[in-house]
Image (cartoon, rainbow, N blue to C red):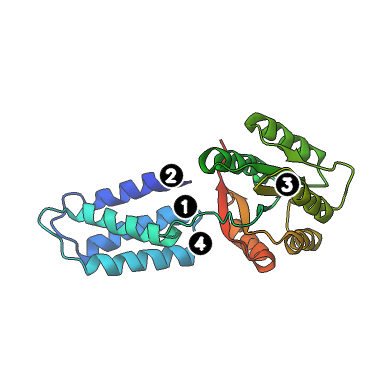
Amino acid sequence: MFENLSERLDRSFKLLKGEGKITEINVAETLKDVRKALLDADVNYKVAKQFTDTVKEKALGQNVLTAVKPGQLMVKIVHDQLTQLMGNTAEEINLKGSPAIVLMSGLQGSGKTTFSGKLANMLKTKKGKNPLLVACDVYRPAAIEQLRILGNQINVPVYSEPENKNPVAIALNAIKEAKANNHDLVIIDTAGRLAINEQMMQEIAAIKNAVQPGEILFVVDAMTGQDAVNTAKEFNERLNFDGVVLQARR
């Protein structure tokens, strides 16, 4: 999606190539294509319109320096506004606590299990953490096995109780295990469904209330598009999550 959007934006900026100055006419033509590129990338219409309106306002208020071409200036304005839209400050993951607890949330197939392994490996190698992965998907034995395989690959232990169907109890037991074995980080992989349902939301809310995680991440397939917004709202209302992970498929 991002690659396609980048290509479309590049073509849009070529409309200004050779122009001597920025005018309302050539900006309107450029932003018309930018808005279409955003909509084709499944960006919400209101977001796309607000974005292009803001870019237009900033572009028309700029004086073009002799050393800067109009196309170059538009690239900078659009880039800066995209950065603002996506969040212009970097936030570190919260690793406070003994142990620090990270709770994964999201629908089935979003990539929670895979990302749990990636995160554990990154924090182990980059931050010197001693993580424990926790398998709290009590509905899919394959999810537990997948987490075990990932754990073996990165040399990180995985806590699971295959016969226990109580994810809250599993999570609490895992934290006891972490404390007993000097793990300073616990990453809890939870169950997902094909669609949001009340049982799912109650279950993950119960895990949150029981373990009090310092960081809650919502994992979504990067190809989901606008449907991810509605799903994210549902999860955020129950969990008040701290960050969103866009999991790319390759």
- The disc placed on residue 40 is 1
Q: The disc labelled 1 sits on which kind of residue? A: Asp
Instruction: Indicate the secondary structure of the residue bearing disc 1.
Output: helix
Q: In which quarter of the image is residue 119?
A: top right
Cα distance between the residues tagged 4 and 3? 42 Å
Instruction: Indicate the secondary structure of the residue bearing disc 3.
Output: helix
Of pointers 3 and 1, the one earlier in the residue sequence: 1
Instruction: Indicate the secondary structure of the residue bearing disc 2.
Output: helix
Residue underneath mark 2: 4
Cα distance between the residues tagged 3 and 2? 44 Å
Q: In which quarter of the image is residue 87?
A: bottom left
Cα distance between the residues tagged 2 and 1? 9 Å
Q: The disc labelled 3 sits on which kind of residue? A: Ala
Cα distance between the residues tagged 4 and 1? 10 Å
Residue underneath mark 4: 44
Q: Looking at the image, can residue 135 be seen?
A: yes
Taking the spot 67% from the left edge, 64% from the top edge, the residue there is: 239
Assess whether mark 1 and mark 4 are in contact (beta carbons under 8 angstroms).
no
Residue underneath mark 3: 178
**Where does residue 24 sit, x and y in percent of width and height?**
23, 66
The nearer-to-camera label among 3 and 2 is 3
Taking the spot 77% from the left edge, 39% from the top edge, the residue there is: 144
Q: Looking at the image, can residue 191 be seen?
A: no
Assess whether mark 2 and mark 3 are in contact (beta carbons under 8 angstroms).
no
Assess whether mark 1 and mark 2 are in contact (beta carbons under 8 angstroms).
yes
